Image (cartoon, coloured by chain):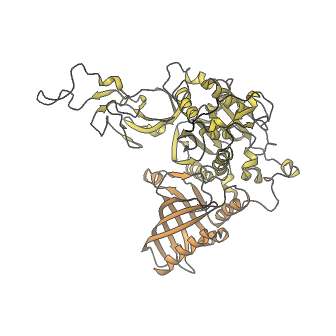
Amino acid sequence: MLERSRPARSWPPEGATRVPYWVYQDEDVYDEEQKRIFLGPTWSYLCLEAEIAEPQSFVTTFLGGMPVVVARDAAGKIHAFENRCAHRGALICMQARGKAERFSCIYHNWTYDHAGNLLNVAFRKGIAGKGGMAPDAKPESQAPKQLRVHAFQGLVFGTLSKSAPAFEDYVGPEVLPRLKRVLIKPLKVLGSYTQVLPNNWKLYMDNVKDTYHASLLHVFFTRFRINRLTQEGGVFVSKDGAHHCTYTKMVEDKGDAYEQGGMRSASSSSFSLENPELLHQVDELGDAVSIQILSLFPGFVLHQIRNSLAARQVVPKGIDRTELNWTLFGFADDDEAMTRRRLLQANLVGPAGYISMEDGAATGFVQRGVAASPDRASVIEMGGDKVGSGDSRITETAVRGLWKAWRSHMGL
Amino acid sequence: MKEVEQLHARYAHALDEDRLEDWPNFFTENGVYRIATAENEARGLPLPVVYCEGRKMLRDRVQSLRHANIYEPQRYRHIVSSVLIEAAGKDHVRSTSSFLVVRIMENGETMLFASGRYVDRIVLAPEPQYEERIVICDSRRFDTLLAIPL
């Protein structure tokens, strides 16, 4: 009989500049990161406050692999709890969103309030003295877990951990101002969709944090001179490496570094948009930033691409499958022209986005490319081996930050 | 109406045969093309997955797919059926039809990529063209990426 054995996994001796490929492949790593990261002392994005604007409204979402209900009670307070009935473990709430006075599990009609407290066990005392539970039964002992919830400028985050720092401290002073920068007014949801990625969730996160790839993979950027590494910009990384933000200024690039370097993404003079209306930006945040991509560990991304604004929730669905939930939004006081601009600029993002469609393909190529090489590693040496903020985007500092944070949570 | 079904069929064959350059010509000069999801439509939310106003924007999408965007070689097979036609005026009709789009990758991997309905406003003269084609996908999910138009 063949004995199944796997060599013990260890981090390459180079440290921060290498990421071994087994991190994207091992089932036990996946299980462990669910426990230590998603259900551990981290804050995860759950939904927008605007999606549960009304009292008694709710949405269902995820905390890593855990199904979660986020609900606003009659008094307006936001709660989140595990979508699992205390009785037999069925989903308590099966709709994506709606309004409800209370939640009743369809299986045996056990009911819960908006905070996930068990209100009633059907026929708990039996009928006419027969059946039912013993007086000292404790069905509440298996109650769904309740999350700590924090609403920040219209975004709702949650954690199961009592020891996670306050949300603002978790994000830290490097990245928090960049989050506030976008979320300046009440938000209005424009719509949502899901992009299913054929890869490990961490490949998407390190793609987002990879400021070096943007103008090389996303040729649309470069051809139309929307984002080139020669434009003014920079990157902020939190002290622990977990969170990042990168931005590019609106100034038009007139240089030819890409043409001189013979890049695939270089432009030819014959290539231009016949109708460039979808690139027209109004500087609504007043700081001449054309693109800002911000990520919070473990699985949240906020983008401002011109006037397109969106929250992206990264939901792991197995070692090689990730669901990316995009919710595009504007501000509640947008006029018709701004809404039209945001809808035209929706062409830039999402699964069919001119400047985002490649991400799903590229990260899937890594998942497939490394199939037989769990013991080999990525080379992440752009910008040296440090993790920190800077004014060049030809760096992989934020990617190294992701792995610094991940390893610290995983004890690896 | 035969000519409406012919328009739907010519549209589908053009995309499935990779004649993307012909695609804008199925629309009037100011024709609108929008891919939406049934969920967003039901919620009254306007978010498009793809949104082009006029042939120039349609041609821009083709240009970008040909020269800027990177995606793995793939083909579609459109199956269009259950075509309903409702006269909307002397030279206009409205049409709703069902579609399935199968995606075939270069290695042969084949999947049901999208299903939904086309909700069209068609001008008949001088030749049938879409004044508006709204592609309402049944699902909110898209596998990997959506490059070739539906």
Q: Which chain is orange?
A: B
Report the side of B150 relative to B38 (left or right).
Answer: right
> Which quadrant: the C terminus of chain A?
top right
Residue B120 versus residue A229 in the image, above or below: below
**Near-viewer residue (A108 or A290):** A108
Determine the residue positioned at 68% across, 62% down: B60
Residue A334 appears in which quarter of the rendering? top right
Residue A131 seen in this snapshot = yes
**Near-viewer residue (A200 or B113):** A200
Quick one: which residue is furthest to the left in this view? A128
**Near-viewer residue (B29 or A412):** A412
Residue B50 rendering spot, x and y as whole percentages: 58, 57
Residue A48 seen in this snapshot = no
Report the side of A399 relative to A79 (left or right).
Answer: right
Determine the residue positioned at 66% across, 29% down: A175
The number of numbered discs placed on residues in the rendered structure image is 0
Residue A186 rendering spot, x and y as whole percentages: 53, 36
**Near-viewer residue (A260 or A364):** A364
Q: Colour of chain A?
A: yellow
Residue A258 rendering spot, x and y as whole percentages: 84, 49
Residue A102 versus residue A96 in the image, above or below: above
Residue A77 rendering spot, x and y as whole percentages: 41, 28
Quick one: which residue is furthest to the right in this view? A260
> Which quadrant: the N terminus of chain A?
top right
Residue A178 versus residue A352 in the image, above or below: above
